[in-house]
Image: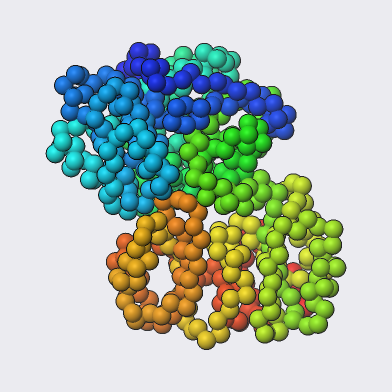
């Protein structure tokens, strides 16, 4: 397979529409991270993504008869743009099947190339099913986003350019979704420069290739993350996985916050805004450099795309500091008495860089504040622990608590003493009109909704937090009802952020077994 792929890379047809993008030095990042770092600027392609390479190489090698029948693909973004542009350049018809949840900016980006857009289903898998049936009806050629030899070869020209421009590089970090880019790049580089380390990067919540690599067989994920949607793939390709097994050295996973920090880094270095998948490579490189204490190495990262929905910048900016280890978020307990808040500010946070402060009295003897504190580096966090402990405050580090960062920070003070037997769930709602109405229509009226929170991020799916009043004996029937809706969900009832800030005052507030630490970063100070 690798030999055939190498041959196809060497004769790939991409430069009729694609550019040989620059391998740009990153002096600021190089100085900060003590390695020589360069950025492959695939965000400078005509569609602001590397995807044009594979799409054009596939379509350019179709027979005249196949071209006349046109091409079709399923895509929620960059691949659809690549197919549409390639078809326009060759003057052939194109159909792009996109989920109904696709943000308008992506739909318009495809439409500007003249392709016919068909909206189908809430998820990519549903759009893919519709695409397959349409391909048969229309007689059009399916252009797979990654699991195709010619598509992989087109993406592999990125690797060819890398070693032409910098033959003595040491490491290349590659963002991974279905595996088309990493398979093509790894096959080429390892065939000619076997000493170069090829490292794949995936988000923790979309790590199908990493898990498959570790288990030695393709793994299908039940759910995928909604932030780095450009790499949100449930199952990697058959062909791509085979190449990856033989050609890739290692994989590394990163968090959503680390991706946001990488977006910030790339903006500071290049004054461009990478999409989450586009910043994934640098996020992985940073984590790998730290884990392996790399110094003086020649490192390439790939900015794979810049199709960023402007609405998502607020979310990315809000997470950049925590992703860089420069902000910690704490839940801290105060005794409700006159001067308690002033006393806390005087004794604990005077002189600190406060990034967030959420507090509201709840009428009980104890209250909790959600506090964000800026730090110069991660070494300051133990010092914060010590100060809080010495001053006698109970606290818990919430920096890694997704529920606290995504929802609770916007809802502090929302206690509802009249709500009993609350069960809390987080959902991924498709971003389309009627999503909430559909949820309410399918859900049984047996269970009252006692809390609801949603904030748009400009993504294909919105993150929603809902609490229901559910008796213990109803739990099985209740989750059956949730599954009938068809939206992915996670039970959050035991999340400490919920217990501290949104739940009716509970046993821990009176000083009995207040909390079981949820991570190594949790700590309990002496109680007052």
Q: Is residue 291 visible?
A: no
Q: How is the image coloured?
A: rainbow
Residue drawn at (56%, 71%) of the image: 498
Q: Where in the figure is residue 327, as x and y percent of width and height? A: 70, 53
The answer to whether residue 312 is above or below residue 155 is below
Q: Work out whether residue 503 or residue 212 is closer to the camera in this orientation and state it.
A: 503
Q: How many numbered callouts?
A: 0
Q: Where in the figure is residue 58, as x and y percent of width and height? A: 30, 24
Q: Where in the figure is residue 372, as x and y percent of width and height? A: 70, 59
Q: Is residue 71 left or right of residue 514?
A: left
Q: Is residue 478 left or right of residue 66?
A: right
Image quadrant occupied by the C terminus = bottom right
Task: Indicate the quadrant where residue 259 lies.
Answer: top right
Residue drawn at (58%, 19%) of the image: 169
Residue drawn at (57%, 16%) of the image: 166
Q: Work out whether residue 525 or residue 56 is closer to the camera in this orientation and state it.
A: 56
Task: Indicate the quadrant where residue 183 lies.
Answer: top left
Image quadrant occupied by the N terminus = top left
Q: Where in the figure is residue 247, as x and y percent of width and height? A: 43, 25
Q: Is residue 466 visible?
A: yes
Q: Is residue 401 left or right of residue 336?
A: left
Residue drawn at (63%, 34%) of the image: 271
Q: Work out whether residue 317 or residue 218 is closer to the camera in this orientation and state it.
A: 317
Q: Work out whether residue 426 or residue 45 is closer to the camera in this orientation and state it.
A: 45
């Amino acid at each position: 397979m690798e030999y055939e792929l190498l041959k196809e890379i060497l004769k790939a047809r991409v430069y009729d529409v694609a550019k040989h993008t620059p391998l740009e030095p990153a002096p600021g990042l190089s100085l900060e991270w003590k390695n020589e770092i360069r950025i492959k600027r695939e965000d400078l392609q005509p569609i602001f993504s590397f995807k044009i390479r594979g799409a054009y190489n596939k379509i350019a090698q179709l027979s005249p008869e196949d071209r006349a029948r046109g091409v079709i693909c399923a895509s929620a973004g960059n691949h659809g743009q690549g197919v549409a542009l390639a078809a326009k350049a060759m003057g052939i018809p194109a159909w792009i099947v996109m989920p109904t949840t696709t943000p308008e900016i992506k739909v318009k980006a495809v439409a500007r190339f003249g392709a016919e857009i068909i909206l189908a289903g809430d998820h990519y898998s549903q759009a893919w099913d519709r695409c397959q049936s349409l391909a048969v009806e229309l007689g059009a050629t399916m252009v797979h986003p990654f699991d195709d030899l010619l598509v992989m070869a087109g993406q592999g020209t990125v690797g060819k350019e890398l070693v032409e421009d910098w033959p003595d590089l040491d490491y290349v970090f590659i963002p991974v979704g279905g595996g088309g880019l990493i398979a093509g790049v790894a096959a080429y580089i390892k065939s000619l420069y076997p000493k170069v380390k090829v490292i794949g990067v995936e988000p923790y919540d979309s790590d199908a290739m990493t898990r498959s690599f570790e288990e030695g067989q393709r793994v299908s994920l039940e759910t995928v993350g909604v932030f780095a949607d450009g790499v949100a793939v449930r199952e990697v390709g058959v062909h791509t996985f085979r190449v990856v097994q033989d050609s890739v050295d290692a994989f590394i996973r990163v968090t959503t916050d680390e991706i946001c920090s990488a977006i910030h880094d790339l903006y500071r270095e290049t004054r461009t805004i990478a999409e989450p998948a586009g910043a994934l490579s640098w996020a992985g490189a940073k984590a790998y450099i730290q884990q392996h204490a790399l110094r003086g190495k020649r490192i390439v990262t790939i900015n794979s795309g810049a199709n960023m929905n402007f609405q998502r910048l607020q979310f990315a900016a809000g997470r950049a500091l925590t992703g860089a280890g420069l902000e910690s978020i704490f839940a801290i307990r105060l005794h409700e008495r006159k001067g308690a808040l002033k006393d806390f500010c005087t004794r604990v946070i005077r002189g600190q860089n406060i990034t967030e402060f959420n507090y509201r009295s709840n009428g009980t003897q104890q209250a909790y504040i959600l506090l964000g504190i800026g730090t110069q580096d991660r070494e300051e966090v133990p010092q914060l622990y010590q100060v809080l402990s010495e001053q006698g405050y109970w606290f818990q580090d919430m920096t890694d608590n997704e529920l606290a960062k995504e929802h609770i920070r916007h809802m502090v003070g929302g206690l509802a003493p009249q709500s009993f037997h609350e069960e809390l769930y987080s959902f991924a709602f498709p971003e389309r009109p009627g999503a909430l109405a559909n949820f309410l229509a399918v859900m049984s009226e047996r269970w009252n909704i006692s809390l609801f929170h949603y904030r748009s991020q400009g993504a294909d799916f919105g993150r929603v937090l809902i609490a229901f009043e559910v008796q213990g004996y109803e739990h099985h029937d209740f989750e059956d009802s949730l599954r009938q809706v068809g939206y992915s969900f996670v039970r959050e009832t035991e999340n400490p952020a919920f217990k501290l800030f949104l739940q009716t005052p509970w046993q821990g507030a009176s000083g009995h077994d207040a909390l079981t630490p949820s991570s190594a970063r949790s700590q309990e100070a002496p109680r007052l």
